């Protein structure tokens, strides 16, 4: 691209348009975080238990890893567009087929369609804009990956009240998955159709990678196999796993917990779920931006400390305003993990194989997404309130604090390789 400047063509031209497309796609994917709005309606219609009713959501999060791992590896070879389009079709169709669930003995159908098919599609799409934009924005890696996933957090802001309105207007609660699935499909296909990697030789004029300061990137590019042979990959994955476990424990129960602890109506709780999505999205940008300045591991320490404090207090927050503030902080910190970790992985392992390396790291989302909701729902059913489950989650956040201080950049005894090279279409 060196000749482009001479011809008056900006090497970075069009990259902000890709950010807009990425946010559109992530808005559709982030609808999964509005699941707690479905909990009580599905329980009332089908007689499912609290543990049963969160299974489709839990399986969706649990299978995201499959899509992100496969999609990430394909993206590094074929580019982001085919992966995002294919994953978008799976995600939309999975939601559409979920509307076929019609009886209490068809929980398996909701799990397979919404959970497995939709979850795998979600994972494939989710990883593509993150890896793509980290290549387009080496000069703003933390901020831009935060923005790239902010739409995911904001998705529930739109979908929660829409889903609540649709649910209140029909006795067949699963029928609402049909119009929602069609809307998701259209949004993802529109945004993903513009996805592309930078051309070979791409660079940002005037940008030089940092060699000092708080957020310092490594100098070596790792393949997935090489990254998996470092202890840092496992430490980063463990940090993300525990951060996800804590935050999603509340997300999976946000509506129910607001009604049980603060005594608000289902309508008010659904509104809160939508508003909390703003904090999920904002946390992805704010913490990622902050991590550029204070350091990635310092940022993760902050997220975990805040979640521990909030979970200790939440079961006793009978005042709705207090409950809402504490929940907002948890959502901020949960979103912050997803905003900061892509930039962290790129710092540690480089960007050319970011799709595969961070795609594999999304196993943290799947593990945490299964463990958090199951711990919370099982302990609630055992104790009859949220004191025990939320206290256990607070302890998990405190235990996780041992990891960031010991997670250093990997050493490169074999010598450096170019960190910001771009390969592939």
Image (cartoon, rainbow, N blue to C red):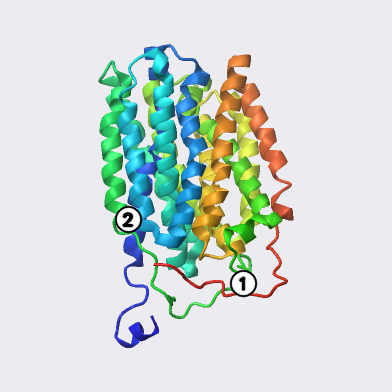
Q: Position of residue 194 (x, y in %)?
A: 30, 59
Residue 255: x %, y % from top left: 45, 26
Residue 146 in sight in this render: no
* Quadrant housing residue 7: bottom left
**Percent x, y for residue 217?**
60, 67
State the quadrant of the N terminus.
Answer: bottom left
Residue toward you, 127 or 263: 127
Residue 230: tell me if it is visible.
yes
Classify 58 as above or below 199: above
Task: From this view, report whether residue 197 is shown above or below residue 389.
Answer: below
Residue in front for this viewpoint, 408 or 58: 58
Task: Tell me whether the residue at label 2 lies in contact with that at label 1, contact meaning CB atoms closer than 8 angstroms.
Answer: no
Residue wearing tag 2: 21
Q: Quadrant of the C terminus?
A: bottom left
Q: Secondary structure at mark 2?
A: helix
Which residue shows up at 56% across the image and 65% down it? Answer: 350
Q: Which residue is mark 1?
A: 219
Above or below for 316 versus 421? above
Residue at coordinates 66% horizontally, 39% vertically from top-left? Answer: 397
Which label's residue is closer to the chain start, 2 or 1? 2
Q: Position of residue 14 (x, y in %)?
A: 32, 68
Question: In the structure shown, which secondary structural element does the residue marked by tag 1 occupy?
Answer: loop
């Amino acid at each position: 691209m060196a000749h482009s400047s001479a011809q008056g063509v900006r090497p970075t031209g069009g990259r902000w348009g890709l950010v807009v497309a990425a946010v559109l796609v992530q808005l559709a994917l982030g609808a999964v975080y509005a699941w707690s709005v479905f909990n009580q309606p599905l329980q009332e219609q089908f007689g499912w238990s609290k543990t049963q009713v969160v299974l489709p959501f839990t399986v969706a999060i649990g299978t995201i890893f499959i899509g992100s791992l496969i999609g990430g590896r394909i993206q590094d070879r074929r580019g982001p567009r085919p992966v995002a389009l294919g994953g978008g079709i799976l995600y939309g169709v999975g939601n559409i087929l979920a509307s076929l669930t019609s009886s209490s003995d068809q929980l398996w159908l909701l799990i397979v369609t919404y959970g497995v098919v939709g979850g795998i599609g979600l994972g494939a799409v989710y990883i593509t804009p993150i890896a793509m934009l980290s290549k387009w924005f080496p000069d703003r890696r933390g901020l831009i990956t935060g923005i790239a996933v902010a739409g995911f957090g904001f998705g529930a802001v739109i979908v929660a009240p829409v889903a609540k309105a649709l649910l209140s207007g029909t006795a067949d609660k699963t029928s609402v998955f049909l119009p929602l699935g069609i809307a998701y499909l259209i949004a993802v296909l529109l945004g993903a159709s513009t996805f592309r990697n930078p051309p070979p030789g791409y660079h940002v004029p005037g940008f030089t990678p940092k060699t000092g300061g708080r957020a310092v990137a490594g100098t070596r590019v790792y393949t997935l196999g090489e990254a998996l042979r470092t202890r840092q990959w496992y430490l980063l994955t463990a940090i993300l796993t525990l951060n996800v476990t804590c935050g999603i424990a509340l997300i999976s129960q946000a509506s129910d917990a607001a009604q049980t602890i603060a005594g608000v109506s289902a309508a008010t709780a659904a509104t809160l779920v939508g508003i909390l999505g703003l904090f999920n999205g904002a946390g992805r940008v704010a913490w990622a931006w902050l991590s550029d300045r204070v350091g990635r591991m310092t940022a993760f320490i902050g997220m975990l400390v805040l979640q521990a404090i909030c979970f200790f207090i939440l079961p006793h927050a009978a005042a709705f305003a207090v409950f809402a503030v504490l929940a907002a902080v948890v959502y901020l910190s949960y979103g912050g993990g997803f905003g900061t970790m892509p930039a962290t992985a790129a710092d540690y392992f480089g960007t050319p194989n970011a799709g595969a390396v961070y795609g594999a790291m999304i196993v943290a989302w799947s593990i945490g997404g299964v463990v958090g909701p199951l711990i919370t729902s099982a302990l609630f059913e055992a104790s009859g309130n949220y004191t025990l489950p939320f206290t256990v989650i607070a302890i998990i956040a405190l235990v996780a604090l041992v990891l960031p201080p010991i997670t250093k950049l990997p050493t490169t005894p074999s010598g450096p390789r170019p960190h910001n090279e771009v390969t592939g279409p």
